[in-house]
Amino acid sequence: MSQSINIPKVDELAQELASIQQTGSKRIALLGSRHVPITHQQMIEMMSYALVLTGNRIITSGATGTNSAAIRGAMRADPSLLTVILPQSLDRQPRESQEQLQQVMHLVESPENDNLTLGEASALCNQEIVSRCQQLICFAFHDSQTLLKSCRDAEDQRKVVTLFYFD
């Protein structure tokens, strides 16, 4: 009975070791589903808060759910260490998000994507977020195609990826 074992390559192990040993601040992207129970949102908010308190920069998007929780935590800890990149312009965001987003110091709008569907704009936005981070923490469902693609893109760019599933 032979079984294939997926052994990590030396450069992957070296990258993970370097990441673990890094003691300075990192640019960490927090992305995830809009459909998140309140208890999970509270945990994401605490994680974001703790990451910022330890000097890390948080990069996220402006949607409700995961991203909103990440914004709340980072804003509570140190608003100057938060960057929010929107998939479209601010006025295209849900009303419940706009008030929170107007308080963000480093807000990047993407009005050039206003003519795209939200799914298309979100995919482009996630690509931009992944390109700016050193590490990606993602909260998704097994059928969250856009988020899972963002994780694969981050891995292809040799970023450290931590993926949590809600289901």
Image: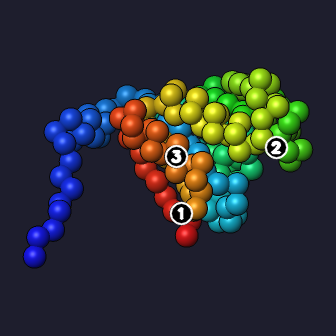
- Calculate the distance from the C-alpha at mark 3 to the C-alpha at mark 1: 11 Å
In terms of secondary structure, where does tag 1 sit?
loop
Residue mark closest to the camera, 2 vs 3: 3
Q: Quadrant of residue 87?
A: top right
Q: Residue furthest left?
A: 1
**Mark 1 highlights which residue?**
142
Q: x and y percent of residue 155 in the render?
A: 39, 41
Say left or right for 23 vs 45. left
- Calculate the distance from the C-alpha at mark 1 to the C-alpha at mark 2: 25 Å
In terms of secondary structure, where does tag 2 sit?
helix
In terms of secondary structure, where does tag 3 sit?
helix
Q: Which mark is residue 97?
A: 2
Q: Nearer the viewer, residue 119 or 67?
A: 119
Label 1 environment density (alpha carbons within 10 Å; few <14, some 14–19, many ≥20) = few
Q: Is residue 149 above or below residue 55?
A: below
Say left or right for 97 vs 132. right
Q: Name which residue lies at 48% across and 45% down.
A: 151
Q: Quadrant of residue 11?
A: top left
Q: What's under tag 3, amino acid-wise?
A: Lys
Q: Is residue 23 above or below residue 142?
A: above
Q: Name which residue lies at 76% across and 42% down.
A: 118
Q: What's under tag 2, amino acid-wise?
A: Ser
Q: Nearer the viewer, residue 121 or 47?
A: 121
Question: Is any part of residue 75 visible from this angle?
Answer: no
CB of mark 3 within 8 Å of CB of mark 1? no
Q: Name which residue lies at 17% across and 62% down.
A: 4
Say left or right for 8 vs 62. left
**Mark 3 highlights which residue?**
149
Q: Which mark is residue 39?
A: none
Q: Name which residue lies at 72% across and 33% down.
A: 86
Q: x and y percent of residue 158 in the render?
A: 35, 35
